[in-house]
């Protein structure tokens, strides 16, 4: 039976979109990559033949494109897609482990390189996954010598589009002062409130200078923890 003849809820691509890749069997995942079958052979049947040809999934992952061409129905386009997908996995596994943010000091370490040595105030956003691994680190705004904007909507949108579940922000004070302004306190409260509204975890808002860093509390009565040494 052709994949398009299956009920919509049983088609691999649709199931992947609704239930996630983990819900699919190996041949179903490969069928999504192949895209189609040939001459009465469905994409899932072709996927099963490709896996059998390579011995198992590990053999498929190590196969060069020309080996896949030996399977009837697999042309250069299909072979290239499969080989490219597995090569991307190998590249991702070879990359160094992402830095993790488990506390304020980690956030300072990740954000400081984008803030120190600059004569204008910058706002840095650090986006993390549920385990604290950094998914994105970016400068969102750059202002004057003593101010920059804190665009709450842009912060939340950037976290969501990056696939993050937690985030922290930090900005520099070129003057060297670690004291938060009234605007800093207000902005921190607004960011925390917005994060809670959409179900994100707000880690911290830090002030970073060339030699130290300090947390900005959510309320003026909260104790400010500081570190008088570089992270």
Image (tube, rainbow, N blue to C red):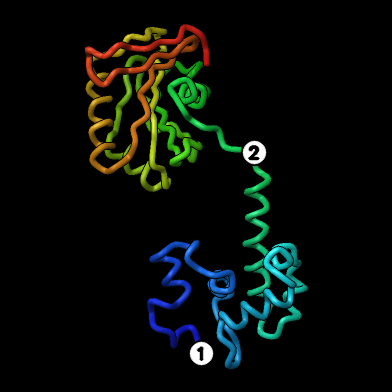
Q: Is residue 43 above or below residue 91?
A: below
Q: How many marks?
A: 2
Q: Nearer the viewer, residue 39 or 142?
A: 39
x 22%, y 14%: residue = 220
x 43%, y 70%: residue = 15
x 42%, y 45%: residue = 162
Q: Residues within 10 Å of mark 1 (few under 14, many from 20)?
A: few
Q: What residue sits right under mark 1 in the picture?
A: 1
SS at mark 2 in the image: loop
Q: What residue sits right under mark 2 in the picture?
A: 96
- Residue found at the far bottom of this picture: 40
Q: Nearer the viewer, residue 59 or 73?
A: 59
In the picture, measured across the screen, residue 94 lies left or right of residue 105, that is: right
In the picture, measured across the screen, residue 205 lies left or right of residue 65, that is: left
Residue 131, percent across and down? 47, 38
Q: Quadrant of residue 141?
A: top left
Residue 84, percent across and down? 65, 62
């Amino acid at each position: 039976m052709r994949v398009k003849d299956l009920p919509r809820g049983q088609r691999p691509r649709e199931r992947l979109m609704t239930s996630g890749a983990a819900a699919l069997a190996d041949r179903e995942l490969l069928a999504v990559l192949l895209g189609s079958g040939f001459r009465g052979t469905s994409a899932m049947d072709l996927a099963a033949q490709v896996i059998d040809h390579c011995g198992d999934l590990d053999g498929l992952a190590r196969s060069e494109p020309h080996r896949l061409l030996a399977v009837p129905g697999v042309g250069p386009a299909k072979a290239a897609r499969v080989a490219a997908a597995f090569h991307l996995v190998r590249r991702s596994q070879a990359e160094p482990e992402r830095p993790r943010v488990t506390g304020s000091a980690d956030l300072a370490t990740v954000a400081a390189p984008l803030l120190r040595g600059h004569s204008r105030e910058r706002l840095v956003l650090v986006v993390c996954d549920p385990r604290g691994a950094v998914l994105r680190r970016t400068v969102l705004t750059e202002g004057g010598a003593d101010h920059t904007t804190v665009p709450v909507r842009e912060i939340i949108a950037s976290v969501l589009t990056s696939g993050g579940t937690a985030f922290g922000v930090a900005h520099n004070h070129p003057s060297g002062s670690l004291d938060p302004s009234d605007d800093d306190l207000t902005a921190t409260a607004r960011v925390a409130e917005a994060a809670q509204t959409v179900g994100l975890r707000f880690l911290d808002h830090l002030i970073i200078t060339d030699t130290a860093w300090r947390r900005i509390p959510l309320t003026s009565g909260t104790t400010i923890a500081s570190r008088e040494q570089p992270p």
